[in-house]
């Protein structure tokens, strides 16, 4: 999913920024120390330092800068994760509208708005905007409820666990709104007895690791939930009943019926030329070429429009060649419950060796990707435990149980 790739890129940039900034502080401190110790040697090689009120080379101040840096990076990392979880829903919306077809939610449009629409994209945008508005303002807990209600995905089944993920977000809240000072609610919930919290380097590194693994599992679960299609070669092809190449010689300028906004009736079906047009190319001032596709009724109705224009002497219809191109949809391959059980039976006791999905795929005759997604789904269902690099990773909440 695009949102997952964006999250990986953002988290990688944040980690690189964090490491590079620490490195810069360390190197600058070292150079200043050496310069103050022996200014003469530095001056002989053309190195010159200027004192700055903003950079204080004291251990105490450097530690404070490192603390502020880790907190800033952490807050942005949490924001990147929340954005990923919201944008992942947008990716689902692009792939399929099925999870969003709700009878209990009503959108209001004026008649003027509907008649002004050039395409359904405006309606779709209004639907998804309303869908996600509460999530953007409601925070992580609202996102958790949404995924469970609409996709059947329970975050508690994924490492590091729902409670640990909530602690990550609660800590971000304290850093942003209380400058790290804890409140009674936080101290009681997480059995924490200190008046303030911060982000240590160890904690930050663990959060990067946890978020990356968490995002990967959620991404795999969503891909499965969207359409259950594993083999892209077996995806349902676009069905085109007719396609035409049209070449028109313009005699009196470009007529309205040649513009994308042109509307006409194909029998009882209202049609816009823009919805039929695959390619539009004006080769010169007098020649327009169109590639249009649609039902035979739509193609023949538009051909009649052009023929009427030709009779009036407005255009010359040099070419209108139609080719029927109807394709039977290919039968998709679904990862169903029986296949999941079959793959689960083949999995040995954990921890598994690296590449176990390839071994099972070869034995059962499935693709490596097919079995890999199936294993991630089984982990998401709680049937198996998550593992990274051969090590079993359990959610925090289940470790305590």
Image (cartoon, grey):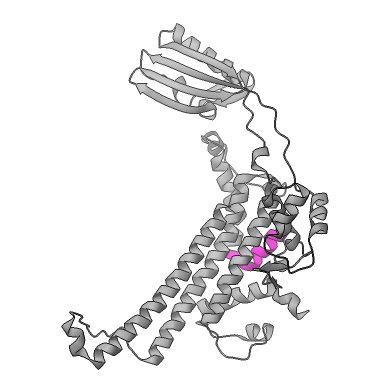
Q: Is residue 295 visible?
A: yes
The vertical placement of 160 against 311, above or below, is: below
Verify whether residue 138 appears in magenta.
yes
Side of 48 where 399 appears, left or right: right
Q: Please provide percent x and percent y for residue 223.
A: 66, 52
Between 115 and 237, which is closer to the camera in this rendering? 237
Provide residue 253's location: percent of width, then percent of height: 36, 18
Judge whether 121 appears above or below 151 on screen: above
Evaluate whether residue 149 shows in this view: no
Tell me where residue 114 sits by quadrant.
Answer: top right
Q: Position of residue 317 (x, y in %)?
A: 45, 11
Front position in the image: 19 or 366: 366
Q: Quadrant of residue 377?
A: bottom right
Q: Is residue 369 above or below residue 240?
A: below
The boundaries of the magenta stretch are: 137-152
Which residue: 48% across, 78% down?
A: 70
Asked if residue 325 lies left or right of residue 317, the reply is: right
Q: Residue at x 39, y 78 (%)?
A: 23
**Residue toward you, 277 or 201:** 201
Q: Residue at x 45, y 9 (%)?
A: 310
């Amino acid at each position: 999913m695009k949102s997952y790739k964006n999250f990986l890129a953002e988290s990688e940039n944040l980690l690189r920024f964090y490491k590079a900034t620490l490195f810069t502080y360390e190197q600058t401190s070292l150079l200043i120390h050496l310069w103050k110790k022996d200014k003469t040697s530095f001056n002989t090689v053309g190195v010159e330092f200027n004192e700055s009120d903003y950079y204080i080379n004291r251990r105490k101040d450097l530690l404070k800068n490192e603390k502020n840096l880790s907190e800033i990076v952490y807050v942005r990392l949490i924001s990147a994760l929340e954005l990923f979880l919201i944008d992942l829903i947008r990716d689902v919306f692009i792939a399929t509208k099925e999870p969003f077809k709700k009878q209990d939610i009503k959108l209001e449009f004026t008649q003027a708005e509907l008649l002004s629409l050039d395409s359904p994209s405006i309606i779709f945008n209004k639907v998804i905007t309303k869908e996600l508005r509460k999530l953007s303002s409601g925070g992580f807990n609202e996102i958790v409820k949404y995924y469970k209600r609409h996709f059947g995905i329970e975050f508690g089944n994924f490492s590091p666990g729902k409670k640990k993920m909530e602690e990550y977000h609660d800590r971000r809240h304290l850093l942003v709104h209380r400058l790290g000072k804890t409140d009674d609610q936080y101290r009681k919930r997480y059995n924490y007895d200190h008046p303030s919290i911060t982000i240590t380097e160890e904690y930050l590194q663990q959060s990067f690791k946890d978020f990356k693994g968490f995002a990967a599992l959620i991404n795999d679960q969503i891909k499965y939930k969207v359409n259950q299609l594993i083999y892209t070669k077996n995806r349902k092809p676009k069905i085109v009943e007719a396609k035409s190449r049209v070449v028109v010689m313009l005699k009196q300028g470009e007529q309205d019926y040649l513009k994308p906004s042109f509307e006409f009736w194909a029998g009882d079906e209202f049609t816009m030329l823009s919805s039929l047009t695959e390619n539009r190319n004006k080769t010169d001032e007098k020649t327009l070429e169109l590639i249009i596709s649609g039902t035979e009724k739509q193609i023949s109705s538009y051909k009649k429009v052009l023929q009427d224009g030709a009779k009036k002497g407005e255009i010359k219809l040099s070419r209108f060649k139609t080719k029927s191109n109807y394709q039977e949809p290919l039968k998709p391959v679904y990862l169903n419950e029986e296949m999941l059980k079959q793959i689960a039976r083949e999995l040995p006791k954990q921890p598994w060796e690296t590449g176990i999905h390839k071994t099972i795929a070869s034995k059962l005759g499935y693709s490596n990707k097919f079995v890999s997604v199936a294993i991630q789904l089984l982990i998401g269902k709680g049937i198996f435990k998550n593992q990274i690099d051969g090590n079993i990773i359990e959610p925090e909440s289940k470790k305590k149980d």
